[in-house]
Amino acid sequence: MPAPRPKVAPAVALALGLAALAALSPTGSGPVGGSAGTTVPLAGLTGPEVLHRALSATRAAPSLRLDVTRRRDGGSSTRAFLAVGADGRCAGTLTVGTTGTMELIRTGDEAYVRFDEAYLRVERAGGGRGSPQRTERVLTMLGGRWLRTDPADRGPVDGPDPCDLDALLAGVEAGAGSARRAGLTTVDGRRALKLTASAGGATTTAYVAAEGEPYLLRAETRGGAAPGTVSAVSLRASDGPVAARPPAPADVVDLRTGGGS
């Protein structure tokens, strides 16, 4: 368990608070598992059986490339592009609204985030966090550098941690028992079996690969604990590892030491 982190000065509190939303451009290539022309025997399975099989296959993949979106009626929206590994590594980019991007690297034991100038300015202005002079000091300190933080820090995450596959798929799993087959379709050029499910006031539409390994290709959930919210995740399994390596020490700001690593 990581040691408790000391409190930090107001000028950098924003950066720590933002620390765990998550992501960096996906790497790696095509799907793992069976060949594209091999049909998985899903014909004799019920909806719940198909969805449980898809969840198991997806979690067993060495790594996944994710495209995660979350939209709230009349409110904020986020989009993350992630590479998530079975070993806890995660890398990707996250965009909030139409401006501002942050990058994240998680190596398992450590996490690093880097914000562009637009992200920092919008967040500080929106939250009324200090004077313009303090904003400039934060920008000077972090400009182009990575902030080292705790992998458990969530920051102002609206919804599941995008680096946590179990959290992202919790809504899909909750409704698996009610899943119903809804015919064949295509997702990104791949044949897929469409399923619909519901649980706790939320409705989920899931798409499972009908050829090759029965990976979950896409899932979209509406409503539930957050009415008016639509969450969607597109997934692509890969044999390749996640390229999540710590930045060079000279490029890191470590709040635990009050300066660079």
Image: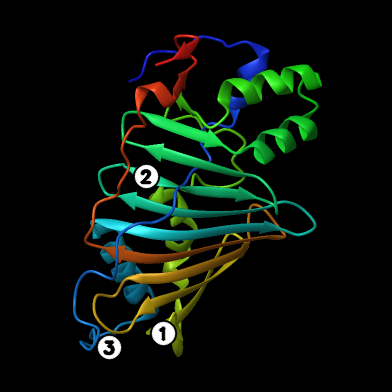
Q: Is residue 19 visible?
A: yes
Q: Amino acid at mark 2?
A: Cys
Q: In the rendered view, does 142 fall on the left or right side of 186?
A: right
Relative to 236, say whether 170 is above or below.
Answer: above
Q: Which residue is mark 1?
A: 189
**Quadrant, the N terminus:** top left
Mark before the other along the chain sequence, 3 or 1: 3
Could you tell me residue 98's position as x and y percent?
Answer: 70, 54
Q: Is residue 5 visible?
A: no
Inter-mark Cα distance, 3 to 1: 24 Å
Which dot marks residue 90? 2
Q: Amino acid at mark 3?
A: Gly
Q: Secondary structure at mark 1?
A: loop
Q: Secondary structure at mark 3?
A: loop
Q: Are discs 2 and 3 less than 8 Å apart at CB? A: no
Q: Which residue is mark 3?
A: 44
**Quadrant, the C terminus:** top left
